[in-house]
Amino acid sequence: MSSSDIFTGETIGTAVLILLGGGVCAAVTLKRSKAQNAGWLAITFGWGFAVLAGAYIGTKSGAHLNPAVTLGLAIDGAVKWSDVPLYIGSQLLGAMIGATLVWLAYHGQFKAHLTDPEIVESLNPHEGMVDQTAEPEAGPVLGIFSTGPEIRNAVQNLVTEIIATAVLVLFILTMGLTKGLATSGTGTLMVALVVVGIGLSLGGPTGYAINPARDLGPRIVHALLPLPNKGGSDWRYAWIPVVGPLAGAALAAGIHKLAF
């Protein structure tokens, strides 16, 4: 496929993925949202539907929407290595666009949430105001943009992301074993359902990034957006949802080559 096909499909598809996925996180998190506190099921199914929409929209490029998927396919020989930088660059750009669109769609809710006295107090409970010189690791709305661990243990967090991504990429690589699944629209639906399953089963420890662009692009946007009292972007953790999924993809490709 052409470079323009890759760029267009991956940029727009990933943007829609992050718009709908980040959108459900915003809906559940932010004050003055009708879906506030809807819970983990809403988030996992929201992300599954986001994958479904983004993947169908990105069909023209193969709908990777994820550097880990691109890496796994390249190791398996299904994607040319020379196309990998374009795939990943387009995915990162799309993720940043999608995160910006989430902010625009929920602009009023972001403002209401981040200026709420309860949130301001939680950032600096001793003074009731934000200390601009002591940025917290993760601000109160960072979870809308990117992932973070419930228990901060680098080894465990990395292993969790490796395992979860390996499941996703191995499923994608083995779809071809079921006749017609990879070439029919059903394959895309199955991937979306697997993402829901990963979220329900393996998402608890880290929020299941399973996609470096999904995490890094919106984290950059969080750092750049003019959000009051937004707190830190947790750059100390940011390498794990990048390295973990890439390692998981390589592991899945290795298993696929050996076992199938």
Image (tube, rainbow, N blue to C red):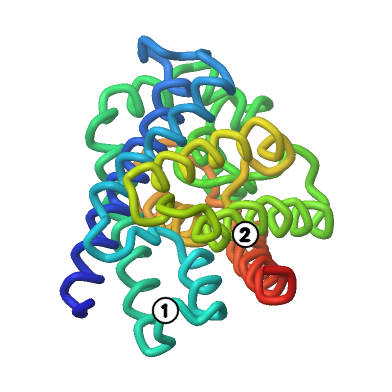
Q: Residue at (43%, 87%) from the top-left corner?
A: 81
Q: SS at mark 1?
A: loop
Q: Of callouts 2 and 1, which one flags the residue occurring earlier in the amino acid sequence? A: 1
x and y percentages locating residue 138 in the rendered image: 60, 44
Q: Residue at (67%, 50%) from the top-left corner?
A: 164
- Between residue 139 and residue 193, name the one nearer to us: 193
Q: Which residue is mark 1?
A: 79
Q: SS at mark 2?
A: helix
Disc 2 marks which amino acid?
Leu
Residue 59 tag number:
none
Q: Is residue 171 above or below residue 17?
A: below
Q: Is residue 145 above or below residue 33?
A: below
x and y percentages locating residue 79 in the rendered image: 41, 79
- Between residue 204 and residue 82, name the one nearer to us: 82
Give residue 83's quadrant in the image.
bottom left
Disc 1 marks which amino acid?
Val
Q: Is residue 174 above or below residue 25?
A: below
| Pointer 1 local density, CA inside 10 Å: few below 14, some 14–19, many at least 20 | some
Do the CB atoms of the residues marked 2 and 1 lie less than 8 Å apart?
no
Q: Which residue is mark 2?
A: 170
